[in-house]
Amino acid sequence: MKNRFFRKTGLIAVLLVLFCAPVLAGSISVQVDAQASVRGPQITFGELAEIHGADEARCELLRNLKLGPSPQPGERLIWTDQMLGSRLASTGADFSGINWQMPPTLTITAGAQTVQAEQLKTVSLAAIRQLLGPAADSGNITIDLIGEVRDLMVSEGIVKLSATLPSGVHYAALTTVVIRVDIQDRSPVTTVLNYDVRLYRNIIIAGKDIGAHELITPEALHLERLEVGRLSAGYFTDFAEIAGYAAKRPLAPGMIITKSMLEKPVLIQRGAMVAILAKAGPLQVTAQGEALQDGRNGQLIRVRNIESRKIILAQIVDSDTVLAPAYYRP
């Protein structure tokens, strides 16, 4: 008790020296509680003490004195009476004529509230689904949270949650969702959640061995449901897209068919006899020719007219017909 008396007396002496005013029965009384809770970003004297007096304007001025930043939500600070006195003195306020009641130590706790983990997950998942649009309900996409999500401690006040995806949705890497927590009269708080988003499709694969330059038929293919996020571009999901193509190289069962593996089949082989079709307005004539190189549909190849021995470039129309240039005369 004696030590406590001297500590309190010491603080009052500090105030007397600072403000050169006797501590008498003044018009204002200040009672500092041993436990105090603060809400704003700055600790105000009014949150630490009961301040009463006839001069209400001066009381309000004392209540609004800022004594330093508040602790983090839910955390606390412990000040001695000397520390509080020093903070008060640094404000430059007039403390004359005040009756003081002050404990030797003061515990200051920042008010807090909890944003539940489920709220964070709900907001982040909704943001992903909104970005995906109708595809989110197609049955072809899975969305899995990565890691544990904990409740978030924030300051007291009205809370508003919002979520953004800075880099969009990724199927081949983590999808990051940034959640912003706005609290009335406080700086916003952000937290990050990561998701594994995967896209599945029915992909065309080889069902049996297919030889190089062999025409690919539907019987040689089948569909398999695969996760496509890490697949190379150019895969197929529709048999009609492959119709009429041949394999550039041998394909083994189970291989995913891609555009780079396909080529148009050779329609005309070197040495084959073809009909050279020449058009001039409404007239058209034909002549017999010999293909001097292999060719595919729509390709220009060298063709020799059997009768005139002329060699021209003609476009392949089908397996036994080529179209000569407009200026050609057999």
Image: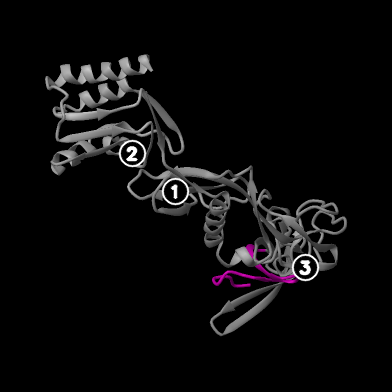
State yes or no: discs 2 and 3 in contact (Cβ < 8 Å). Answer: no
Question: Which disc is residue 188 wearing?
Answer: none
Q: Nearer the viewer, residue 324 or 154?
A: 154
Q: Amino acid at mark 1?
A: Arg
Outermost residue, right direction? 208
Counting from the top left corner in percent of width and height, residue 217 is at: 81, 66
Q: Residue 91, position in %: x, y?
A: 20, 28
Nearer to us: label 1 or label 2: 2
Q: Amino acid at mark 2?
A: Pro
Q: Which residue is mark 1?
A: 180
Asked whether disc 3 touches disc 1, contact meaning CB atoms under 8 Å apart, the reply is no
* Label 1 to label 2: alpha-carbon separation: 18 Å
Q: Which residue is mark 3?
A: 273
Work out which residue is located at the far bottom of the displayed protein and give it. 282
Going 72% across and 70% down the picture, which residue do you hit? 240
Q: What separation in Å lies between label 3 and label 1 (alpha carbons)? A: 74 Å
| Residue of label 2 | 41
Mark 1, secondary structure of its residue: strand
Crowding around mark 2 (Cα neighbors within 10 Å: few <14, some 14 to 19, many 20+) is some
Q: Looking at this view, is 317 or 6 the one in front? A: 6
Residue 324 is covered by the magenta coloring? yes
Instruction: Specify start and end residues of the magenta stretch as a single range.
Output: 310-330
Name the secondary structure under disc 2. loop
Element at label 3 = strand
Residue 170: image x %, image y %?
58, 50
Contact (CB < 8 A) between labels 1 and 2? Answer: no
Q: Residues within 10 Å of mark 3 (few under 14, many from 20)?
A: many
